[in-house]
Amino acid sequence: MVELEGPEALCMMKSRTPRAAKLRPDHQAKLVPDRRGTMLVPTPMLVARALRQVRRGRLITAAQLRDRLGSQRGAELTCPLTTGIFLNIIAGATEEALAEGHDVTRQGRVADVDRALIQR
């Protein structure tokens, strides 16, 4: 087995399925019991709608986004795993749309509190 480094390694992780196809508007959010309370398992479209509500030029952490989603749906917490996966899918779908020449307006930005932001 050959191990790749640098840009070649990133190319190997590219999905065969377009990310926009993974947004799946037909899925429904679920409220499931958890030992910590009721947990919301969001859908990709629910996360995307919540991101669109972030005002232009503002930052939001994934934890704040999960808190907002949970409180809107009457849950004590929101699944961090699925929220993170869906944030990745949404970011990939946005990049694909930009690469195809679509006019995509990015309104907000999700930041990780444990990492520094890149200054641009």
Image: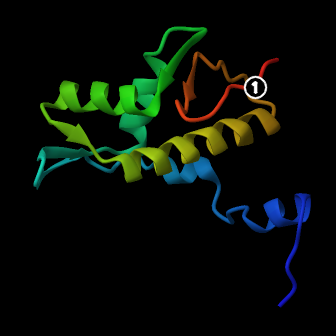
The percent position of residue 15, horizontal first and vertical second, equals 67, 63
> Around disc 1, counting alpha carbons within 10 Å, would you say few (fewer than 14), some (14 to 19), or many (20 or more)?
few
For the residue pair 9 and 27, the one nearer the viewer reads as 9
Q: Quadrant of residue 63?
A: top left
Q: Is residue 104 above or below residue 80?
A: above
Residue type of the residue flagged with mark 1: Ile
Residue 119, position in %: x, y? Answer: 78, 19
Point out the image quarter for the N terminus.
bottom right
Q: Is residue 28 left or right of residue 22?
A: left
Identify the residue at image location x=55%, y=52%: 21
Q: Position of residue 44 (x, y in %)?
A: 42, 44
47 lies left or right of 113: left
For the image, the number of numbered tags is 1
Above or below: residue 58 compared with residue 44 = above
> In the image shown, does 110 or 52 lie closer to the viewer?
110
From where the camera sits, is residue 100 visible? no
Quadrant of the image for the C terminus? Answer: top right
Is 120 placed left or right of 85 in the picture?
A: right
Write down the residue under mark 1. Answer: 118
Q: Which of these two is toward me, 43 or 110?
A: 110
Element type at marker 1?
A: loop
Colour approach in the figure: rainbow
Give the image location of residue 51, x and y in percent: 47, 25
Of 114 and 52, which appears nearest the observer?
114
Q: In this rendering, is residue 7 above or below 1?
A: above
Q: Can the viewer see residue 80 in this picture? A: yes
Q: Residue at x 19, y 26 (%)?
A: 71
Q: Name above or below for residue 28 compared with residue 16.
A: above
Quarter-wise, where is residue 99 in the image?
Answer: top right
Residue drawn at x 72%, y 22% as measured from the top left: 103
